[in-house]
Amino acid sequence: MSFPDPRHPARLRRSVLCVPADNERALGKIASLVCDGVIYDLEDAVLTDRKAEAREMLVAHLEKSRPAGVEIVIRINSLKTPFGEEDLLDAIRLQPDAILLPKVESPADIQLAADLLAENDAPDSLRLWAMIETPRGVLNAAAIAETGRTSGGRLDCFVPGLNDLRKETNVPALPGRPYLVSWLMQILLSARSCGLDIIDSVYNDFRDADGLDAECRQGRDMGFDGKMLIHPAQIEIANRAFGVTSEAAAEAAAIIDAFARPENAGKGVINLDGRMVERLHLDQALKTAAKADAMQNKDNPA
Ligand code: COA
Ligand code: MG
């Protein structure tokens, strides 16, 4: 996909913090945190007998305080459970940026949610995110991603869920995720084939800053846009790993400057200090520069 993408130019998704909707103290902390997104969770983090209470707490919380400058996402229970539809209807009323669907396994799961959103007059700006966290979900990732291209499909972003996937497959949690990388890359390729964003899975050991840093860097090098987080202490590490370094920003500026020079007008490829630089690198450089600007606005507001 060429840049800028008119749907969400340079949207930052470096750090997306999950907060259980029935944890009053954690909910109260959100406004003071500098993450790019918040996922209010009604699913895995909430016990079955607290589902209704969690939903009520979330409605009360978001009606009185919405974090500013943060992407707001609500993770509902699967529409195959008794809780999913009511979650979805309340979520529509709360007007988040996106609804995160858990355990998505087929295009029909996305279509069902999209149909319910349309029937209930949800605005087009309300997007869908999909957790890919079951063996069938991984195998069908490409077909699921295709729904992002259909009109009314609303799909914007994938989030692999490794805790569920490990449980379903018996693959253990090992440093470097050696046996999971191929599945992650398959999910990532599926997302990119349809222009979707993709957020890396959570790192459970929230006191292990070095381990998280290593996994964030791995995720960045694999091509993820950011990381789903479970604890405030993880935000700064993810923002750093998935941010634009000053070196990368300077290099992007040099490429943009070079193509703007009159002698390079109309050229598809140029020599920049002994390196071949093509127009596709200019697209990448514009994207990096826009992300650096967005970071500047977010992290150092005027
Ligand atoms: N969002 C916002 N605040 C959070 C938070 C989160 N995800 N996790 C912890 N905090 C807050 C705590 O409330 C605490 O503040 P307090 O002292 O004012 O209560 C502070 O950060 C320090 O927390 P700490 O004592 O280190 O951890 P904890 O025992 O309170 O919580 C977890 C640990 C794992 C239970 C908690 O981080 C959590 O529930 N994370 C999200 C889990 C989740 O959403 N899972 C589903 C997706 S994988
Ligand atoms: Mg899960």
Image (cartoon, rainbow, N blue to C red):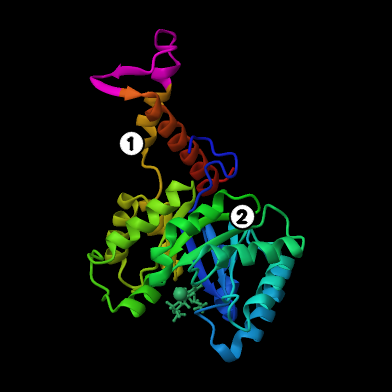
Amino acid type of the residue tagged 1 in the rendering: Glu
Q: Residues within 10 Å of mark 2 (few under 14, many from 20)?
A: many
- The residue indicated by pointer 1 is 247
- The residue indicated by pointer 2 is 154
What are the residue bounds of the magenta stretch?
257-276
For image coordinates 34% across by 52% down, the residue present is 220
The image shows residue 11 at horizontal and vertical percentages of 53, 47
Vertical side of 253 occupied by 54: above or below: below
Lateral position of residue 146 relative to residue 218, left or right: right
Q: Hey, which quadrant is residue 217 in on the image?
A: bottom left
C-alpha gap between disc 1 and disc 2: 35 Å
Vertical side of 301 occupied by 273: above or below: above
Q: Secondary structure at mark 1?
A: helix
Lateral position of residue 40 relative to residue 213, left or right: right
Q: Hey, which quadrant is residue 127 in on the image?
A: bottom right
Q: Is residue 74 magenta?
A: no
Q: Is residue 273 magenta?
A: yes
Question: Which quarter shows the C terminus?
Answer: top right
Lateral position of residue 129 relative to residue 207, left or right: right
The image shows residue 100 at horizontal and vertical percentages of 56, 66
Q: Secondary structure at mark 2?
A: loop
Choose the circle earlier in sequence order: 1 or 2: 2
In terms of depth relative to the viewer, which is nearer, 83 or 260? 83
Do the residues under discs 1 and 2 have CB atoms within 8 angstroms? no
For image coordinates 53% across by 72% down, the residue present is 19
